[in-house]
Image: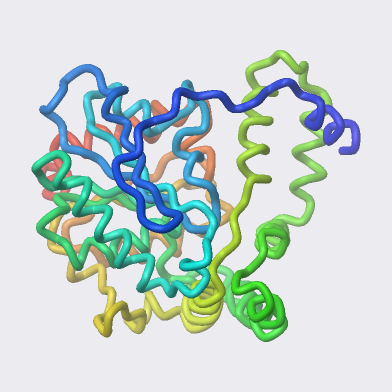
Amino acid sequence: MLDGIQAYRVHPYRRSVEEPDVLWREGTTRLLDYRRFRTGRKNTRIPVMLVPSLVNRAYILDLRPERSLARWLAAQGHSVFLVDWDAPGEMERDFTLGDYIARLRRAMVTASDAEAMPVAAIGYCMGGLLTLAAAQGVDSRIDALVFMATPWDFHADRPDQAKGLAALLPGLEPSLAAFGELPVDVLQTLFAALDPTLALRKFGAFASMAPGDESATAFVALEDWLNDGVALAAPVARECIGRWYGQNSPAKGLWRVDGLAVLPQDWAKPALSIIPAGDRIVPPASARALADALPRGSVLTPKAGHIGMVTARSAPDRVWAPLAQFLDDPDAAAQA
């Protein structure tokens, strides 16, 4: 493991991509515009808006040119927009989930206006919950939803683990009060607790890789992203840990935004749930609960992990191509 960590520290890889344009910004949030990378069937495919989680950097969906869902979709002819939340600033430290969802709605309207038509919104992990809540407030701007490894029933699998996380909240309050956010190091510790021996295994394996191999470069690129975390605004941390994980409010129909319950059964348009079979972060049973509640939903269960579904060498064949097929005709998929 120590040899692997040292090899990682001295590896020459540094992320280098041609940056997209910025269509819109509000506070620390930007809406990245990939339309100049678009090729193929221009103006004939539905525009796409990618919505990542709040707890990790958005570039997991644009990791490297050859491992970028955003650029791959643009190469298929889609106009692609990516929400980059960035870390909370002075304004965002007071944000609730409702504040972020209101901002996301404004970004959705901006993307729709830019293309003069509704868009398909793709939410990744926590971003899927935000996407569902936001879309229900601007449904005329959204033609279809895609949920990638999105949790919904937080007690569907390992309920004791979810409740145990919520039980930590009182102990986290001093940090939340002092910093106005849940620090990155605390978040990293919580993620590490899901699989305490993961670092031992992955760095031990990396120690045996040749530095110039593609597998070594892919490892470093992903590890750099994992170590480039962002803090979570204190009110959001309280809602997610206490209400989502502790009370299981989404699955119970108790999660409310602007006083209205966020209910997947109210989404009457097509939806696709991508549920990786090997997901160790979001149990498939948790994501399946959302899929089962969508009236016009279809399901894809690729052989992939939570992160591998967007970064692995097999992702284009197992995940991205079926996603593009859904986007070509969401109504047909919903009727199948």
Q: Residue at x 39, y 45 (%)?
A: 301
Where does residue 77 sit, x and y in percent of width and height?
A: 22, 24
Where does residue 318 sit, x and y in percent of width and height?
A: 40, 32
Closer to the camera, 251 or 189?
189
Q: Is residue 140 above or below residue 181?
A: above
Q: Quadrant of residue 200?
A: top right
Extreme top residue here?
A: 212
Where does residue 332 sit, x and y in percent of width and height?
A: 11, 42
In the displayed structure image, the side of residue 122 where residue 114 appears, left or right: left
In the displayed structure image, the side of residue 15 where residue 84 appears, left or right: left
Q: Quadrant of residue 323?
A: top left
Q: Residue at x 27, y 64 (%)?
A: 134
The colour scheme used to paint the residues is rainbow
Q: Is residue 122 above or below residue 136?
A: above
Q: Residue at x 33, y 64 (%)?
A: 290
Q: Is residue 149 visible?
A: no
Closer to the camera, 326 or 73?
73
